[in-house]
Amino acid sequence: MNRMTWLLVAGMLLSTGLLAGDNAKKATAYFVVKGMTCENCEVKIKKNLLHQEGVIKVDASHKAGMVRVIYNPSEVENTESLVAAIDAAGFTARPVSSRIGERRWKTALSPSRKKHCDAGKAKKSCCAASGKKKGCATKKSSCATKSQ
């Protein structure tokens, strides 16, 4: 191989993290957040968390009332610093276990759940809109907004 080919291969390996030592262990933390009501709230929380050292990725959903943070555990000592960053943005956060957080995250953002809640809100019969299970078209125990 010529020099240009080696450079291309090395560049591809670096971008995938195979040579850069990017194989650092990653952890995921989930938080239930109160007061997050719109996309602007999501952006504010994301910005605050991404300024924290060791935070790799942040996903926020005002509809689910949750935030998912992927971070490097060797750089983030505990999740209290992440809670503090969310609180500093003007919201109230509390951590939930990864098992519960992952389940709630998937359930709240699933297309069928979103469709159910959106349709119910339009008809004023959704359990999230009415605050009651009665009238919930799918007989599910909660909608995305109710699971907070």
Image (cartoon, rainbow, N blue to C red):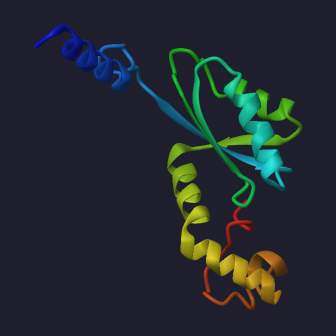
* Quarter holding residue 59: top right
Query: In the rendered image of this protein, does residue 5 appear above or below residue 29?
Result: above
List the single residue furthest toward the top: 3
- Please state the horizontal and vertical placement of residue 141, each as a whole percent of the image: 64, 77
Residue lying at the far left in this picture: please name it. Answer: 1
Q: Position of residue 116 (x, y in %)?
A: 64, 80
Residue 42: give x, y in percent of width and height.
76, 46
Q: Residue at x 51, y 22 (%)?
A: 72
Q: Which residue is drawn at the image coordinates 77% and 28% (left, top)?
A: 85
> Quadrant where the N terminus lies?
top left
Residue lying at 78% horizontally and 34% vertically, measured from the top left: 86
Question: Can residue 23 be seen in this snapshot?
Answer: no
Taking the spot 58% from the left edge, 55% from the top edge, the residue there is: 105
Q: Quadrant of residue 79?
A: top right
Residue 81 left/right relative to 11: right
Q: Position of residue 130 (x, y in %)?
A: 84, 81
Farthest residue to the right: give it.
90
In the rendered view, tell whether residue 82 sits above or below residue 129: above
